[in-house]
Amino acid sequence: MSSHKPLREECIARINRAGQDNGNLNVLLVNAIAQKIGLSATEFECWSYILDHGPFTAGQLAKKCGITTGGMTGVIDRLERGGFVRRQADPDDRRRVLVEGVAEEATRQKITELYRPLAEGFAVLTKDYTDEELAVITDFLQKANVLFQQSLDQLSDERTHK
């Protein structure tokens, strides 16, 4: 009895390959966009993370991003010189310094324009899916992001404990 339906293992292998391709292409896209605004990919990702989830101390940010504290200090220094972040005293503990994201309107507009083709493509792409299918895709991606963060945390912990 033959079936044209792919076996579960084949589907999972295709998901894994597509996920790897997605990750690789995302890294290349981030690098290209970062260059357009004068940042490295690492600087751009750290700045974006600070904007979305910050503020952070330099140590917290280094741990979240899997970068040494010395390396993170250099990233923060470059971002601060470029006007992308500012250091401020922690209002709860004046001995600590928080790194806060800054996004000037011109920079936000430029990034929006750089991402516009991708956003428009996603708008077209999502029209082909039902609300239920979109809910499954969203659930899968959110759970995958948790796995990515757990892997990053583990790698960061392993580097710290060597």
Image (cartoon, rainbow, N blue to C red):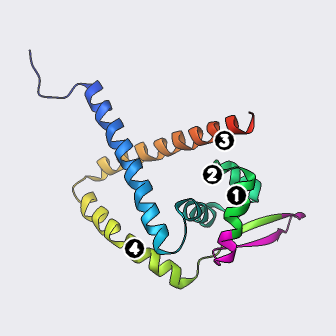
Q: Residues within 10 Å of mark 3 (few under 14, many from 20)?
A: some
Q: Earlier in the sequence, mark 4 or mark 1?
A: 1
Q: Earlier in the sequence, mark 1 or mark 3?
A: 1
Q: Earlier in the sequence, mark 3 or mark 4?
A: 4
Residue pointed to by mark 1: 72
Q: CA distance from mark 1 to mark 3?
A: 13 Å
In the image, residue 79 sits, relative to residue 3, either above or below, namely: below
- Tell me, yes or no, whether the two marked residues, 3 and 4, touch with CB atoms within 8 Å: no
Q: Position of residue 102 (x, y in %)?
A: 64, 75
Q: Position of residue 50 (x, y in %)?
A: 63, 63
- Closer-to-camera residue (49/155): 155
Q: Residues within 10 Å of mark 4 (few under 14, many from 20)?
A: some
Quadrant containing the C terminus in the rendered view: top right
Q: The disc labelled 3 sits on which kind of residue?
A: Ser
Classify mark 1: helix, strand or loop: helix
Q: Residue 156 — which label?
A: 3
Q: Position of residue 148 (x, y in %)?
A: 52, 42
Magenta region: 78-96
Classify mark 4: helix, strand or loop: helix
- Tell me, yes or no, whether the two marked residues, 3 and 2, touch with CB atoms within 8 Å: no
Quarter of the image where one finds residue 153:
top right
Q: The disc labelled 4 sits on which kind of residue?
A: Leu
- Tell me, yes or no, whether the two marked residues, 4 and 1, touch with CB atoms within 8 Å: no
Q: CA distance from mark 3 to mark 4?
A: 31 Å
Q: The disc labelled 2 sits on which kind of residue?
A: Cys
Residue pointed to by mark 2: 65
In this view, the mark in front (2 or 1): 1
Q: Residues within 10 Å of mark 2 (few under 14, many from 20)?
A: some
